[in-house]
Amino acid sequence: MSISDTEYQFRAKDFFIGAQMLFVAFGALVLVPLLTGLNPNVALLTAGLGTLLFQVVTRGRVPIFLASSFAFIAPIIYGVQTWGVPSTMCGLFAAGLFYVALSFFIRWKGVGIVRKILPPIVTGPVIMVIGLILAPNAVNMAMGKTGDGSAVLVAEHSALIISMISLAVTVIVSLMGKGWLKLIPILCGIVAGYIVSLFMGLVSFTKIAEAAWFSVPNFTFPQWNLDAVLFIVPVAIAPAIEHFGDILAISSVTGKDYLKDPGIQNTMLGDGLATSLAALLGGPPNTTYSEVTGAVALVKAFNPAIMTWAAIVAILLAFVGKVGVFLQTIPVPVMGGIMVLLFGAIMVVGMNTLVSAGENLMEPRNLAVVALIIIFGVGGMAVPIGSFHLGGIGLAGMLGVILNLVLPKSEE
């Protein structure tokens, strides 16, 4: 690999490679808005704009794609149900500013300070809480109900057939898929479940036929809500740490140290600005996509401009009205089957974070930190702050940070 292979070179011949990178990200990108009630066309647009903004901030150094973050699914669902979409966008905009503040903090104190404040003993269980809190939503949707289980949308027998086929195909492709196929297990699972739903007569194409080919995405702008800010911002702790892992992964693939050039402070800044930009338009928060990093490793395409093409294709698709309407015809059980695996995987990622750190979890201090984070987060503990109650992932994250800083470490 020559140095020029990793330098920004905007060439028309890279268009198709860029389009393939978007294809890899597509399933996960649109899954978040479909699960949370946000607009998938807006998600496509903000993923494209966020990736371009990230490239500007990092001076076109890093071949990485930014799109919808799974870590925020639970708080978005809760926020939309509690305060509505505009107020939830306010909280997500503030979460992006948290990244920005963290990037300046790293610029000032160095990377080591983040590892001190947010070690694996905190981030691991917080990530586990995200997956565990979402588990009931996944099971309800897999059984044909709404996420909260309040209404039946598809008969349970039919729903279980569809959801389990979607789940099985996703698992099989992730285990046995070769080449590009191995990078798109979610997309394969959705396609399989959708085909089964067609045969069962659960899909209607009426709205697709009525939708315009060209239409401006339905933007939703933020509305100030302090409760939403206090609830959502602590959630940003987990994806902020995930950002480090993603940058290390792409550094390993290309053989360049992006922690130094353009610097983790700049990649974090780009991620934060992309998330705030998405919230300004009503899109889900952005994060660096490890699936696309896998695709980069597979095709050995290290030119960062390829992600520019992927971003441009995403922006163009956002203005195709039929795309968003088609995605909204996907039956609930299809998404439920995918969610069962997806949210379980998030929980396992958190568990693996703890295991990889090699911490003795039976040591009293570690036991207290991990146990309290998980039980407070999953058990529904809430602390009143004026008229607002801080609970769930936000409370778990803040509690973990405080306990880690306050509890004395063992002399061993």
Image: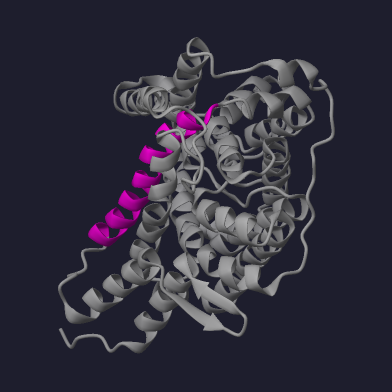
Q: Is residue 70 left or right of residue 18?
A: left
Residue at 79%, 22% in the rendered image: 211
Q: Is residue 208 left or right of residue 65?
A: right
| Image height of 355 relative to 298, above or below | below
Is 65 or 395 nearer to us in this picture? 395
Q: Is residue 232 left or right of residue 185?
A: right
- Magenta region: which residues? 331-356
The color scheme shown is: one colour
| Image height of 143 relative to 284, above or below | above
- Does the image show residue 10? yes
Question: Does the magenta segment cover residue 241?
Answer: no
Residue at 28%, 89% in the rendered image: 408
The part of the image, by quadrant, that contains residue 180 is: top left
Which quarter shows the C terminus?
Answer: bottom left
Residue at 49%, 69% in the rendered image: 394
Is 212 or 387 nearer to us in this picture? 387
Residue 112, percent across and down? 43, 73
- Does the image show residue 257? no
Residue 136, percent across and down? 39, 49
**Main structural element of the magenta stretch: helix, strand or loop?**
helix
Is 173 or 198 nearer to us in this picture? 198
The part of the image, by quadrant, that contains residue 362 is: bottom left
| Image height of 93 relative to 167, above or below | below
Residue at 27%, 71% in the rendered image: 371
Q: How many marks?
A: 0
Residue 298, percent across and down? 44, 27
Residue 227, percent across and down? 64, 72
